[in-house]
Amino acid sequence: MRPILMKGHERPLTFLKYNREGDLLFSCAKDHNPTVWFADNGERLGTYRGHNGAVWSCDISRDSSRLITGSADQTSKLWDVQTGTQLYTFNFDSPARSVDFAVGEKLSAITTDPFMGLPSAIHVKRITRDPDDQTGESVYILKGPQGRINRAIWGPLNKTIISAGEDAVIRIWDSETGKLLKESDKEDGHKKPMTSLSKSTDGSHFITGSLDKSAKLWDSRALTLIKTYVTERPVNAVAMSPLLDHVVLGGGQDASAVTTTDHRAGKFEAKFYGKIFQEEIGGVKGHFGPINALAFNPDGKSFSSGGEDGYVRLHHFDHDYFSIKI
């Protein structure tokens, strides 16, 4: 399995996202320019220029026509995917972190960081079909969590919003009223800040990664813990295979901590685990720094990882991967 090395970012990667067909890969990094690549050969198609700070995440509409990005320049922008033009800019009073389209793209959940005394919040915005009708007002704003909200996604049928962040509590909010419905159990939950959250293709369950060196699989509706995957380094990124019962974890500690920890902790590889039996299947090495972003192609036949080293590595699986006996 030879990786395709995609060099286009000058700074560490923050987020990766495939479109629904799996032919385009969108990457966000700290260098202000979200980039789109061909997902089969890693060729760079173009960049979306206009942000003035690190871009933390992006989401792509179902028909691959719109892109939304959230950036540290205190804005979230809507883009035309094909032409790269900015369609609209949402302005906030603090850095925008996570962005996620609801099913149908009529709504988007955007999280903002705590900043200058402002608490973190989840803003729900209406997205119009015609960019000329777009307004910046929020349908409602959810507040409550302490510390940063690292990721907020829509639950099944857009009925809920699921958020995870630095206070290590997963919260499920009612997307109609904005009420808090459930919080994850202290006993079952993560012990340190959660870095990532990713849902299954059908939306019935989701996985969280945390600095407590584990990833956990949860039920989207009942918020019950299903599985825990333990590793020996902080987990920065998690992804679930849409095809096989595999989860992949990526991470590694900060460079400043290399000399003070176990010698295995510095290995910056993507680790594959069996989703059901929680055992390690294998690893993919290659990055010269922690892995910050992971994404599976929707067909499950390839995956990509983005690292602190500024590279995106695109891996097409060999035939024998699909016959691994767990």
Image (spheres, rainbow, N blue to C red):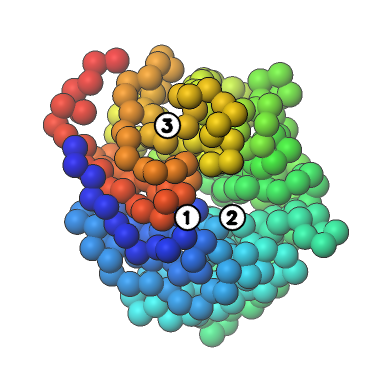
Q: Which residue carries the number 1 mark?
A: 12
Residue 54's place in the image compared with 294, above or below, is: below
Which numbered dot is residue 267? Answer: 3
SS class of the residue under badge 2?
strand
SS class of the residue under badge 3?
loop
Q: Position of residue 55 (x, y in %)?
A: 53, 63
Could you tell which of marks 2 and 1 lies nearer the N-terminus?
A: 1
Q: CA distance from mark 1 to mark 3?
A: 17 Å
Few, some or many C-alpha atoms within 10 Å of disc 2 (few <14, some 14-19, many ≥20)?
many
Residue 209's place in the image compared with 144, above or below, is: above
| Quarter occupied by residue 26 | bottom left
Q: Position of residue 132 (x, y in %)?
A: 54, 85
Q: Which residue carries the number 2 mark?
A: 98
| Contact check, label 2 and label 3, Cβ < 8 Å | no
**Nearer to the camera, 169 or 134:** 169
Q: CA distance from mark 2 to mark 3?
A: 27 Å
Q: CA distance from mark 2 to mark 1?
A: 17 Å
